């Protein structure tokens, strides 16, 4: 991974093309078989543990019933196909056929629309089989021309939790990708590409006293938001990128109250054509479509420092992170950090007190904090001007040489 990161975050990769997986796997292998008995109903737990690629999943000749996503039980929803983004989890019920006349392929296919290019020889599919009879052949999977997965926005939690109708605190995050001064491509929320603070944010919370409610102490480039205990928080995510992104919030599940189609642009709360679900689906990882948006809500009732980030590893590592600091004063009263944890930090030379810059005297003084790479210069640099001058001089001399030698008389033979 470190070697791949050096290649990915580099001026040699200015478009930010992500490394493409070498192959698709199912339970860490290919061509797996799952012995089944006729007539039985099985609960399958499906987890996308990949760092990048989303997966389409289906079972030939069988229907799945979704009953749980990301730890939230849902009313059964029948489907022939599921789209599983990185970090998402599903539980499905599958009832076997009553006869044992054949075995049936289980398919997972990587979403190749996420890839900038498809390497030669890449097989983005992986096949397993429901094995009714080990003496019978394992048939090849049928080729699909289109994918029609279930829309997880339609899922309804079994606990019937009603829509959180009014938000006390709205956070709008605009997602972009761009190059910085080192020539590499980075990811941004609101023009900020996340950089780790010198002091872990949790330790800043516990050492800052009353200043813990001031987002300034957590650093300029950490995208930190302080949440008051018990308030209803709304996150509006506007995707200005041309790709899909799965977003994960630590510490809680959230209600998904709106998701646009592709190319819908930025969310507008005054839109009159939106109908919010009375019982919204809940999960902790949700997909935003290209050039689209979504809106999620949750109550800030779980004190902690919780990251909100894209779960594509390459995007998270290039800054697509925001920090939700929930109930900091409650954390100071209730949290105790084990000494072993502090020792781990000490062994690495990481301070456990102070603001984002490690300042323990003035928590509002961020001198020396970690900062993101400066932006590209808006115009030519001194080196650029020098290069242009020398190029022009070389061009003029070249033209003069051509003119001089081209106009000279040809010597007689």
Image (tube, rainbow, N blue to C red):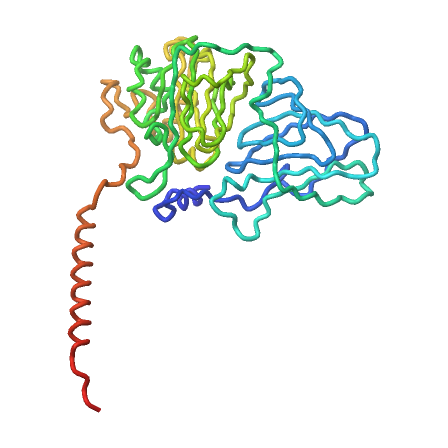
Residue 121 vertical placement versus 191 (above, below) = below
Residue depicted at x 31% and y 11%: 209
Describe residue 400's horizontal placement relative to residue 34 as left or right. Answer: left
- Of 185 and 378, nearer the camera is 378
Q: Which residue lies furthest to the bottom in this view?
A: 413
Residue depicted at x 42% and y 14%: 233
- Of 21 and 6, nearer the camera is 21
Residue depicted at x 36% and y 45%: 14
Q: Residue furthest front?
A: 273
Rendering coords of residue 137 (x, y %) = 79, 45
Residue 201 vertical placement versus 53 (above, below) = above
Rendering coords of residue 398 (x, y %) = 19, 67
Residue 281 vertical placement versus 107 (above, below) = above
Describe residue 155's horizontal placement relative to residue 170 as left or right. Answer: right
Rendering coords of residue 166 (x, y %) = 44, 9
Describe residue 390's horizontal placement relative to residue 363 as left or right. Answer: left
Residue depicted at x 35% and y 24%: 223
- Of 279 and 146, nearer the camera is 146
Q: In which quarter of the image is the C terminus?
A: bottom left
| Tag count | 0
Rendering coords of residue 296 (x, y %) = 47, 19
- Quadrant location of residue 351? top left
Describe residue 190's horizontal placement relative to residue 391 as left or right. Answer: right
- Quadrant location of residue 67? top right
């Amino acid at each position: 991974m470190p070697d791949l990161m050096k290649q990915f975050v580099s001026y040699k990769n200015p478009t930010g093309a992500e490394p493409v997986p070498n192959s698709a796997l199912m339970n860490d292998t290919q061509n797996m078989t799952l012995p089944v008995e006729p007539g039985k109903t099985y609960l399958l737990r499906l987890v996308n543990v990949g760092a990048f690629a989303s997966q389409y999943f289906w079972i030939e000749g069988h229907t799945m019933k979704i009953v749980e996503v990301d730890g939230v039980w849902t009313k059964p929803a029948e489907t022939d196909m599921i789209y599983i983004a990185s970090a998402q989890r599903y539980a499905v019920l599958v009832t076997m056929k009553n006869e044992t006349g054949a075995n049936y392929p289980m398919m997972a296919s990587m979403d190749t629309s996420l890839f900038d290019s498809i390497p030669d020889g890449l097989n983005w599919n992986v096949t397993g089989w429901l094995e009714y009879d080990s003496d019978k052949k394992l048939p090849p999977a049928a080729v699909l021309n289109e994918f029609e997965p279930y829309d997880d926005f339609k899922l309804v939690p079994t606990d019937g939790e009603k829509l959180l109708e009014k938000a006390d605190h709205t956070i709008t995050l605009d997602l972009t990708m761009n190059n910085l001064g080192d020539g590499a491509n980075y990811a941004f929320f609101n023009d900020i590409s996340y950089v780790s603070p010198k002091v872990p944010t949790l330790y800043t919370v516990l050492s800052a006293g009353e200043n813990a409610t001031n987002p300034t102490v957590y650093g300029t480039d950490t995208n930190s938001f302080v949440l008051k205990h018990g308030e209803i928080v709304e996150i509006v995510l506007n995707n200005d990128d041309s790709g899909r992104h799965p977003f994960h919030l630590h510490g809680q599940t959230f209600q998904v109250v709106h998701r646009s189609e592709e190319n819908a642009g930025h969310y507008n709360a005054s839109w009159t054509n939106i109908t919010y679900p009375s019982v919204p689906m809940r999960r902790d990882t949700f997909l935003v479509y290209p050039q689209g948006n979504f809106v999620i809500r949750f109550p800030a009732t779980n004190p902690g420092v919780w990251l909100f980030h894209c779960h594509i590893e390459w995007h998270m590592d290039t800054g697509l992170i925001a920090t939700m600091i929930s109930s900091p004063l409650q954390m100071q009263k209730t949290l105790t950090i084990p000494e072993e944890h502090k020792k781990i930090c000490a062994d690495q030379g990481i301070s456990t007190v102070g603001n984002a810059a490690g300042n323990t005297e003035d928590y509002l003084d961020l001198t020396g904090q970690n900062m993101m790479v400066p932006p590209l210069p808006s115009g030519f640099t001194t080196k650029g001007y020098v290069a242009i001058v020398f190029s022009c001089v070389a061009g003029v001399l070249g033209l003069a040489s051509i003119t001089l030698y081209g106009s000279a008389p040809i010597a007689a033979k």
